[in-house]
Image (spheres, helix red, strand yellow):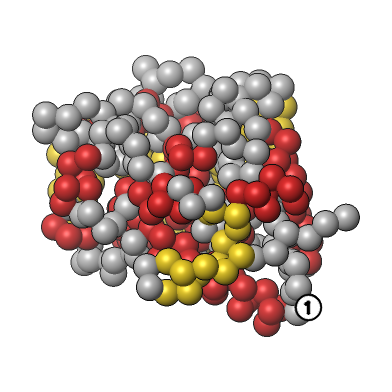
Amino acid sequence: MHTCIYHEYNWGGRSRVGYTLEQLKRDGIPKLLNGIADRDGWEAKRKEIKARWEAFIGGLPELVPLRYDVLAEEEEERHRRVHLRYDTAYGDSVTAFLLIPKDGLRNADGKMPAIMALHQTANEGKAEICLPTGKKNRRYGYELANRGYVVLAPDTITAGERVYEGASPFQTAPFYEKYPEWSAVAKMIADHRQGIDLLVSLEEVDAANIGAIGHSLGGYNAFFLAGADERIRAVVSSCGFATFTGDEKPNRWGRRDWFSHIPAVTDELEQGRVPFEWHEIAALAAPTPFFNWSGQADAIFPHWEPIAEAMRDLRGLYEWLGEPERMLSLDGTSGHDFPTPVRAAAYEFFDMWLHASSVTGQTGE
């Protein structure tokens, strides 16, 4: 039996804690509850993790006043699709699809649960998950709207309608030219938090029952969002959770020629260390109901064994918090995919935790 402890070092002139790569290789996944005796101890650790996380991603801006423009509307058989653009921090705006069911899962007040549907690394952005022409096993925005949920699906920076002029999709260099001390991860969280503001403003939406779902890029964006905003009441992440432990390509999270998530991570890796382990970031949302799906044949995140170990440790935290039923992690033999049976289970998870009163079909297809 072993214990992986924090390693203290100095970052940006401030004392920070994290792990050396040698520690992670030797000891495996660090235990969330190591040295924690009571709730106060966990809350103190959670606060420290949150501060460390926000420092490395460059901080999160305050929400700006809600404002959005409707660009177009189209009717599908079971929902209406609104093409819109909403304001976000620092004078920017976000293009999105808002899907409003024609026969929704209404509560006693006539309001419907809602979902922030976050897309994967697809050049088409929101269109891939919201249109019937989207890629197979990726149309979860479309399916959830057909199931009765109000859905907001924003484009991330560098995708869909938000590709920088003269750049290719998922090229973040123009972003860092403007914001050298920030990060694409913080930008996405900020944009998605503004999306929650939009959802809660709608008369159709039950503001107490909003979830977040995503695959791959959208999967980790979903639990990043839940950790940053308590208005997210349930999370589904498909092939979006990974660990530094066992990852042969840890700089996927750092500075690259392509999509650079958190440039400061590269500086740490060059010193043989990391600022956190990823289940600590997922734990910021605990005990928010969390559904995770991972594939053992995932070519993007092939290190499924430490991923499963991290999920077990996160489940242990939920148990310790007295909410074991709120954490469900599944893994199977598929690749980097969101198969139909798994989506069906994920949608039922939303039905349970977002108090949906009825469903229409297994997946809403």
Residue positioned most to the right: 1
Tell me if residue 271 comes above or below residue 218 in the rendering: below
Tell me if residue 328 comes above or below residue 41 in the rendering: above
Residue 214: x %, y % from top left: 48, 39
Tell me where residue 157 sits by quadrant: top left
Which kind of residue does numbered mark 1 sit on? Ala
Name which residue lies at 17% across and 41% down.
Answer: 174
* Visible residue check, residue 354: no
Residue 169: x %, y % from top left: 26, 29
Name which residue lies at 48% across and 17% down.
Answer: 136
What residue sits right under mark 1 in the picture?
Answer: 37
Residue positioned most to the front: 271
Residue 294: x %, y % from top left: 64, 33
Tell me if residue 95 comes above or below residue 297 in the rendering: below
The residue tagged with tag 1: helix, strand or loop?
A: loop
Task: Decide if residue 246 is on the left or right side of residue 54.
Answer: right
Name which residue lies at 47% across and 26% down.
Answer: 138
Task: Pick whichever, 170 or 130, lies toward us.
Answer: 170
Residue 77: x %, y % from top left: 38, 25
Q: Residues within 10 Å of mark 1 (few under 14, many from 20)?
A: few
Residue positioned most to the bottom: 40
Tell me if residue 120 comes above or below residue 328 in the rendering: above
* Visible residue check, residue 65: yes
Task: Pick whichever, 346 or 318, lies toward us.
Answer: 318
Q: Where's the N terminus, which quadrant?
A: bottom right
